[in-house]
Amino acid sequence: MIKIDHLIYYILQLTWGILQNIAGFLVCAFLLIKDPKRPRFRFKGSFVTLWDSPYSAGIGMFIFLGRTRPEYFMPVLVHEYGHTIQSCILGPLYFFVIGLPSYIWAHRRKYAENRTRGLYRYSDFYPERWANHLGRIFTGMKPIDY
């Protein structure tokens, strides 16, 4: 397990990763304005907010956890934390290298149908596989492998 100092994490997120952090902050602010009592907490320096989506997302140092079964809560959190580390590594390239491809992979009907048929797992696509790997390395916990 690699530990990343929170100060280094914040410096990277707020400089190199500023674009996705502005986007993540705006989503978080919108959710909290809509529902100030919305559950939220910190995880290894990231800001985690629960939302009413079936999907989860990592945008900069902001993690949005969707509705999931209790046994998947931590593995999904570890996976999304991996996306926050990708933000630190890729900086302004994050949206193009991770965000957009990941969004298309998750939401395009053709890919979803192929996953439902068992042709692929969600984690077979490079942004998701890499997020799992980084999440495992930086937390020492098991990510979701779906």
Image: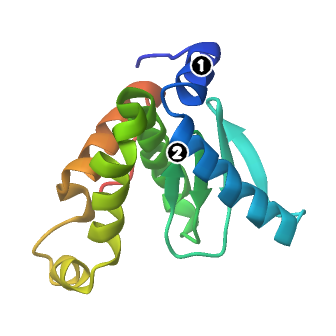
Q: Which quadrant: the N terminus?
A: top left
Tag 2: amino acid: Gln
Residue 11 - label: 1
Is 117 placed left or right of 59 in the picture? Answer: left
Q: Residues within 10 Å of mark 2 (few under 14, many from 20)?
A: many
Image point 44% across, 36% down: which residue?
A: 87
List x then y, in percent, for residue 106. Answer: 33, 70
Q: Residue furthest left?
A: 119
State the image quarter where residue 92 is shown.
top left
Toward the viewer: 3 or 11? 11
Q: Which residue is mark 2?
A: 20
Toward the viewer: 121 or 38? 38
Task: Tell me the element at label 2.
Answer: helix
Tag 1: amino acid: Ile
Mark count: 2
Task: Measure the C-alpha gap from mark 2 to mark 1.
Answer: 14 Å
Image point 27% across, 59% down: which residue?
A: 101
Residue 68 - label: none
* Mark toward the start of the polypeptide (2 vs 1): 1
